[in-house]
Image (tube, coloured by chain):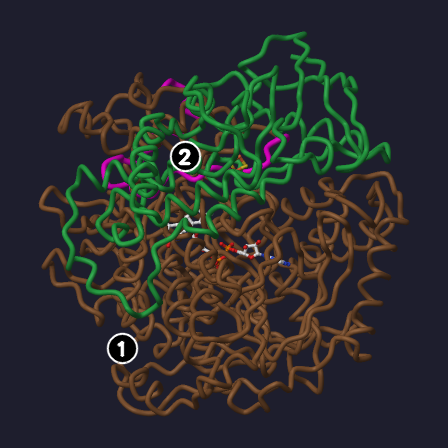
Amino acid sequence: MNLDAKIPPGPLDQKWTKHLANIRLVAPNNKRKYRILVVGTGLAGASAAASLAELGYQVMALCFHDSARRAHSIAAQGGINAAKNYQNDGDSVWRLFHDTIKGGDFRARESNVHRLAEVSTSIIDQCVAQGVPFAREYGGLLANRSFGGAQVSRTFYARGQTGQQLLLGAYSALMRQVGLGAVRLLANTEMLDLVLVNGHAKGIVTRNLINGDIERHAADAVILATGGYGNVYNLSTYARGSNATAIWRAYRRGAAFANPCFTQIHPTCIPVSGDYQSKLTLMSESLRNDGRVWVPKKPGDRRPPGAIPEDERDYYLERKYPAYGNLAPRDISSRAAKQVCDEGRGVGESGLGVYLDFSDAIQRFGLSTIKERYGNLFDIYHEITNENAYEIPMRIFPAVHYTMGGLWVDYNLMSNIPGLFVLGEANFSDHGANRLGASALMQGLADGYFVIPYTIGDYLATLKPGGCPSSDSPDFASVENQIRGRTSRLLEIRGKHNVSYFHKELGRLLWDHCGMARTRAGIQKALEGIPRLRERFWREVNVPGEPGGINQSLEKAGRVADFLELGELMCLDALTREESCGCHFREEYQEAGECKRNDVEFAHVAAWEFRGDREQPVRHTEPLVYESVEMATRSYK
Amino acid sequence: MKVTLKVWRQIDSTAPGSFQLYPTPDLNPDMSFLEMLDVVNDELANRGEEPIAFAHDCREGICGTCGLTINGKPHGPGRGIATCQLYMRTFADGDTITVEPFRAKPFPVLKDLMVDRSAFDRIIQTGGFISVRTGSAPDGNALPISKIDADLAMDAAACIGCGACVAACKNASAMLFVSAKVSHLGLLPQGQPERHRRVARMVDQMDREGFGACTVTGSCEAVCPKNISLNFITRMNRDYAVALFKGE
Ligand SMILES: Cc1cc2nc3c(=O)[nH]c(=O)nc-3n(C[C@H](O)[C@H](O)[C@H](O)COP(=O)(O)OP(=O)(O)OC[C@H]3O[C@@H](n4cnc5c(N)ncnc54)[C@H](O)[C@@H]3O)c2cc1C
Ligand code: FES
């Protein structure tokens, strides 16, 4: 397997500029002769499709949502980072780069992360020009806040709806191109497989979710911007429809899957309340700017929070990480919460929760200030839990939130399959073993607006203009037949359990054994359980309805079938990474309760190659070479 | 608690539909309304019956995918919330709850509780944007914008495009939706060059899609999950008058 990252030579801060100068270009009059498929219209996909169409390429974009505006990006709350240094607090491209590398616990590629920090500033300019109503100061300039434990204020935001406003900006740019006839947009369309012709990605096969038609689409290049796969755990902060099918099918066709076990578990979510629960709601991390996290010192203390005196409370983040306190990074805060709950000190009915207490902040700043800062979040909390967090502390617990792993890509964001590009959360490239707050929006838009429009040219320039294959070819026919076969199989089983049953079971296995803390024995248990569950799925699932028309059970069944394979790969990855780093905490490898990295043996990307259903996938590695930063122990104490 | 659902079932856009009764199993009042539907659907699927089709995704009131008419009201009895933010504790044990799709001619029913809202996308396509190419933007702070204008623009921009406003209106008017986008962009300096062309084109498309006229009854504002204000309609009407005058 060829895992050449194609990192340009030269000093780190000149790589991107030089690469841009040296990259192959497609002549303007030839651009319209190339067809590009963009799967996904979230931040990454919508920005890519719009920008590529503006350049003159023939673009077809598709999403499974009923409108491009509804991608999961819409739900991002907190904000987007950029190294503008508008606050004059010492921020710089270097600092953003360095924070991201360190935050990722030295498991991300230097060159890509530096580029991300470089283009971050253009993203803000672009979004402002589109009319994104970012928060402003009274003087009319853009406001910033500090977010996710950063020591500078580099986060731009639009109330608690930053993702919504950025996505609507990208969506409007995309819709403008649709109106101009430069993009053909297919909503309600799900990619079910990738088609390779002579080893190059040349198209996809889709299902029309309204009439059930299976369709073939050919192109010169395929871009996947299909988001993260956290729903493999069933319960997560993701939208219910988010799924792994596009990248999983690409993996089965030969694309390397990098670091699948790197999943971010966010510390501030509303705890699970019952078995019926369909999703976990994120309470923005910004709450940790003013809220203090605590649990009772005594295990099993069931007194209401107000009855627990100050000296019987353990403000454990402040105690363990005095330098960062309640703002300690996500992986660290989540693990600390798990630890106190494991000790029997968790709060709430299930004992799986910790307090996030605003009483000090209310005393210091007054109720009205806290209302102004977080009013909408307190409202959401009230709506869901029926509790008033101005009076009693919020209860929070970690939940699955983001996947740093994804398809392997090189510096040009091309996978190891020529012609297959992967953007946004779907790729693995920038966040290493842990993502910092407000960096996913930045990465999605960097990839779509400012990287792919240039780097795709380097591939297309090697192809004959107008040489896009026909979708009538046998390569397409064979993939279509496989899809039809799989669909009929799913519909014929008519077993005794609905699809959700299997999804919940899988989620439990992964959460218990491949979640916040992992052990060899636990992972092995999951590695035995998942194949058994998968086998039962294919015997016992009940998928009612017909192949034609709207069939939500069928959609869900296809996605869960893929999750049942992906979950196993995640466990294999977690098992073979015999170290702790970032989100990946192997209990065997720790030092005083913190991650113990093994840079000698594991300073690499693990990229998995599919070898068929009956064979073990093969683990390849891309060494991570740090030329500009020193690989330090990541300490927030 | 237990309730009985009276649900609109319709196989596809051409078939006639009808109400069917579904008694629910025992429910936890802390369940969301959509989680209650999940439970009912899982039971149907276990029996090999087709679950009730309904659209949903984020389940936190931001994507605009969900949208049910519950007891005659788009998004149900709450105020300022989408269907996915409605909790069973709002209802009483033993209630019968009527669940229908959003009803409006420009939103044809696709199946059961799902409707086609692509008309909204086509309206945006005609003018709901600022024409700026990637890479051509000046520095973000080059153009100061008063906080008051930016905040008001954000109030309008908060629209989630769910279509409840249309479903609540006796004329199926889309004025609240369109005026929210027109106002969001029209309030910002970046949006000025295309301000009148934008409103003219969007209103034309709105008419072509078959949305009705606005008689300012305010039923749209009352069901809007984001509390988008009727004032934006007034603002749009002014812009539209100028656009006509200028011949845009
Ligand atoms: C609640 C929440 C809050 C967050 N807050 C922040 C924040 O404040 N700051 C931050 O930086 N990040 C945040 N994140 C993370 C961030 O929102 C996501 O990582 C990012 O938006 C992903 O964008 P994307 O374009 O890669 O994918 P998505 O937005 O998930 O888009 C995926 C697209 O692919 C399409 N698709 C998927 N599969 C298929 C298929 N098989 N066929 C066809 N189409 C398909 C979908 O229809 C959709 O259009 C948050 C995440 C969550 C869950
Ligand atoms: S499901 Fe997203 S708004 Fe209700």
- Spot occupied by residue B21 in the image (x, y as percentages of width and height): 78, 17
Region rendered in magenta: A275-304
Which chain is tinted brown?
A
Chain for numbered disc 2: A
* Residue A297 can be seen in this image: no
Q: In which quarter of the image is the N terminus of chain A?
A: bottom right
Which of A503/B238 is in front? Answer: B238
Total numbered circles = 2
Q: Name the residue under label 1.
A: A629
Residue A172 can be seen, yes or no: yes
Residue visible at 65% across and 19% down? B27
Q: Which mark is residue A396?
A: 2
Residue A122 drawn above or below residue A77: below
Q: Which residue is drawn at 19% across and 51% down?
A: A323
Q: In this view, does A609 lie to the left or right of A110?
A: right
Q: Earlier in the sequence, mark 1 or mark 2?
A: 2
Q: Is residue B25 magenta?
A: no
The answer to whether the beta carbon of the residue marked 2 is less than 8 Å from any atom of ligand 1 is no
Element assignment for label 2: strand
Is ligand 1 within 8 Å of the beta carbon of the residue shown at mark 1? no
Confirm whether the magenta stretch covers residue A285.
Answer: yes
Q: Residue at x 31, y 70 (%)?
A: B135
A189 sits to left or right of B46: left
- Disc 1 crowd rating (10 Å Cα; few below 14, some 14-19, many 20+) is few
Please state which amino acid type lies under the numbered disc 2: Ile
Residue drawn at x 30%, y 41% as measured from the top left: B245
Pick the front one: A359 or B112? B112
- Label 1 and label 2: CA atoms lie apart by 35 Å
